[in-house]
Amino acid sequence: MHSLLRTAVFIGLLSVSLSAQLPRTPNDLPADARQILTERLGGEPFAVLAAWHRLPRGDKPPAWLPERGQWDRPWTLFLHAALWHEDPAVAYAAACLLPREQLDLPAADRWLAVVWPHLWDEEAAYDWDQFRRMASSADVARVLAVQDCWRAEIRFGFQTDMHRCLRPEHVPALCELTQRDDPVLRRNAWSNLATVATYSDQHRERIARALLAWPGPDGDVLEFQDERAKQLPFAPRSVQLPPARPGWSPLLRAALERAFLDLPRPKEEGVKGAVFGPFLCRWAEDERPAAEDRLLLNALLDCGRRDGVCLALRTMARMPADAFLQQRLESVAADPPAALVCAARHDWPALRALAATDSEALAVALEFDFDATFLQWAAVAFGVDAEAGLAAIERLAAAADALALPLRPAPQLPARLRLAIDAFGAQLDHARLHRLVVDFPWARSPRLLELYWLSVTPQNLANCAFPVLEVSVDWHERLREWATAEAPAVHGPAREWLLRVGDTQLADELLAHWQQHHAGDLALLLRIGKAQPVAAWLAAHLAEQWPAGTSDAGQAAFAALAAVAALQGVPHEVAQRWAEELQARREEPRVRDRLAAWRDATAEGEAIDAMVEFYGGGDLAKVRVWGFGQIDDDRVRELLGRVRDTPGADQLAVVGERMLAGDHAARLAVDTLRTRHVYGWFDDASTPVQTGGRSLELVPWLLTELETNCCRRNSAASALRELTGFDVWAQPEHGLVTQPARARAWWAAVGEHLRWSEAARRFEVAAH
C-alpha cells in the first residue's frame, strides 16, 4: 500500500505547473488568469486597477475587489504582477493591497521602492505598519533624514511605532531632529533617543550636545500637533563648555550639570535629565575623576535625585578621601544606600560589617574593598558552618547579579572565586556546591564539577543540576548502576534523568518508568523513541487507539499518530500540528477518503509520504510550514519549493524553513534580512529560525540586536534564552551595566564552553 502512496506523492511533486512562480513583470501574468480577470473587472486588468486607485479614497470599493480571505490564484498572481508594472499608479495600487507575508525578498524591495514616494502623502493608502515592519536600518535612516514633510499620522507613528526599528547608528539623525522647528519631531526624537540610550552607550558626545542645546520642557509643549505653522522656530540653548582640566571631560561635566542640576527635578519619566541619568552615570564611570571635580560632586550630593547622589558617592569611593566632601556626607539627601555612604567615607570596617549580612552591601564592598571583603566572605562560605556558608553563597549570587543603578560588578570576582573553589571546595557539602554550580556558570571549573558529582547521591539526584553534569563529567556508568537498583528511591531519580537525556541502553526500564510516572506525555517518551521496545510500544499504542484501515479515531488516536510520525524524522510539534489538522478536517471529502490510508502509511513507516500528500494536495497558499525545515527529507524540501512558488503563500516563513533545510539561496536571503536589520521579519520568525536551529553561530549577531531598543531586544533575548538559558531580562534596564554589556561579558566568559544538553534541550556551560 505504501508504495502506491509514495507514487502518488511523487506524481504530486511533479505537478509544479499547477502553481506558477511569483511574477516579476506584468508579462508574467498567465493568459488564463488575464482572461478571467478581464471578465471580472470589465476591462484590461491593469488599466482598471489604475483607474480605480486614482479615485478619491472615500469611494466605496468596486464589486470586483475581493476580501482578503477570498483571494484566488488569478487575483493573487495579478497583484504580484501589478507590483512590477511600469505605471506607478498600478504598482502603488498593488502595493497597497499586498500583505508583506506574501512578499519574498525581491518583491519586498520592489514594494518599498513603490511606496517610498507616497510615504508622506496626506491621504496615504498604504499600510504604515507594514512599512515599519519591512524597513531596513538604511530605510529608517532615510526616513529620519527627511525632516520637514512628515504628515501628522507618521509623525505620531514615529513616536509610537518607529522606535522598534531604531538602532544606535540612528542616534546622530535623532539628535538632528531634536533641533527641528516642529515640536512633535523634537519630542518624538527625544523619546526614541532615550529608548536607544537605555541599551547602548554609543554616540555619547552627540547625545550630550543635544541635551545641552535643549532649552527645557516648556519648549516642547504642543496643544495641537497639526498646527505646526503656529509654533515658534526652535532656538537652541547657548552653550559654552567649561575649560579642560584633570578629571571628567568638559563635555561630560556640562552634561552632568545640565541633567542633574539645571533642569527641574523630574515629575514624570519624560523629563530629559531623568531619562538620561543612567546613561550619563555610565559615562562618568568610564572616565577617571579627579580632585578638580569636587565642586560638581558636592552639587550632585545635594541634587535631590538618587541616581545623581549615588554617582557622587561612587565617585568619592574611587578617589582619595577629600576632607571637604567627607564633611558633606553628614547631610546627603535622597536617602542613599548605607553601603555607598560607607564606601564614600572610606570606612571599610563599617562596609564589611554591612556586607556580612546584606547582598547589596556585599556588591559595593567587593567593588571598592575587594581583597579584604572577599577573604572575609570566603572564610564564612567555605567554613565549617554549612548553614552560614550557604547563606554567604546566596548573598554572593544576589550581589553578582545586582547590577542596578548604584552597583557595578567586581571584575576580579570570577578568577578569585575559581581559585577559592579549587583550594577549599573539598570541604563543602552538596548544598553549597549546588549553589556554586547553578549561580556561577563562569566558575564551573573541572574541580568544582568533580566535587559536585561526587556529592550527588540517589537522594539528591532529582534536584541536582544534572544538565550541567551531563555536559561536564562521565556520568553514564554511575547513573545506570543506580537505575538498575531494586529500591525505587534509588532507581527512580536515575531513570528520570536517563529518560530525559534519551538513553537507550535501559529502554525497558525507562519505558516502565515512563508508564508509571509520565503516561500520556508522548513527547517525553519520544526522547528514547529510537529504542526498539519504545518503537514497538508506540506502534501497538497506535493500533490500539486507531485500528488499521479505519477512519474512526478520537483525540488519543491522533496523538498516537503524531508520536509514531515523530519517530520517522518529523519534529513532534510538526507531527502534532499535522495530526490536529487531520482531525479538524476529517469531514472534508479529500481527507475523509485518504485518512485511513495515511494512518496505515504512518504505521508502516511512511509518515512523511502521508504528510506531504496531505499538505501538497491542498491549497499550498494556506500551508503553515513552520518546522518543515527541520525534516531532513527531499520530499519535504520539494514541498517547501512548491509552497515558495505559490502566490499567496507566507514567503517569510518559507524562506526561514528553507534556510533551516540547507537551501543556499534561502540562507543568503535570511542573511540579507539579518544584515539589513529588518525588524518585522525577525520578530515574526519561528524560534528555530531565530536561533538558526541548534547552533551558536548566531549568538554574536543576537548580542548586537540587544543593543538596539526594547522590541528588538525582546526577540533577540528570547532566542538567546531558548539557546542557552541566559536571561537578558535579569539585568535591570536602568543600571550601571546595560543588558547588552552584561550579555557580552557572559558570552566572553563562557561562550566557548557551551555544550548541548539533551536533558535541558539547550546549551549548558560545561566545566572549563
Image (cartoon, rainbow, N blue to C red):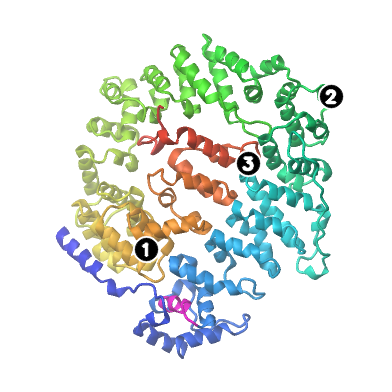
Quarter occupied by residue 278 = top right
Q: Is residue 753 left or right of residue 186?
A: left
Sequence order check, earlier mark of 2 and 3: 2
Sequence order check, earlier mark of 2 and 1: 2
Decide which of 490, 21 is in the foreground and name it: 21
Q: CA distance from mark 2 to mark 3?
A: 34 Å
Mainly helix, strand or loop, the magenta region?
A: helix
In magenta segment, residue 767 = no
Tell me the tag on residue 324.
2
**Residue that lies at the very extreme toward the bottom in this rendered image:** 43
* Residue placed under numbered mark 3 in the picture: 733
Q: Which residues are magenta?
A: 76-86
Does residue 463 sit above or below 667 in this rendering? Answer: above
Residue 351 in picture, x, y percent from top left: 69, 18
In magenta segment, residue 80 = yes
Q: Amino acid at mark 2?
A: Phe
Q: Amino acid at mark 1?
A: Val
SS for tag 2?
helix
Q: Is residue 399 left or right of residue 301?
A: left
The reply to whether dot 2 and dot 3 touch (C-beta < 8 Å) is: no
Residue 245 in picture, x, y percent from top left: 77, 36
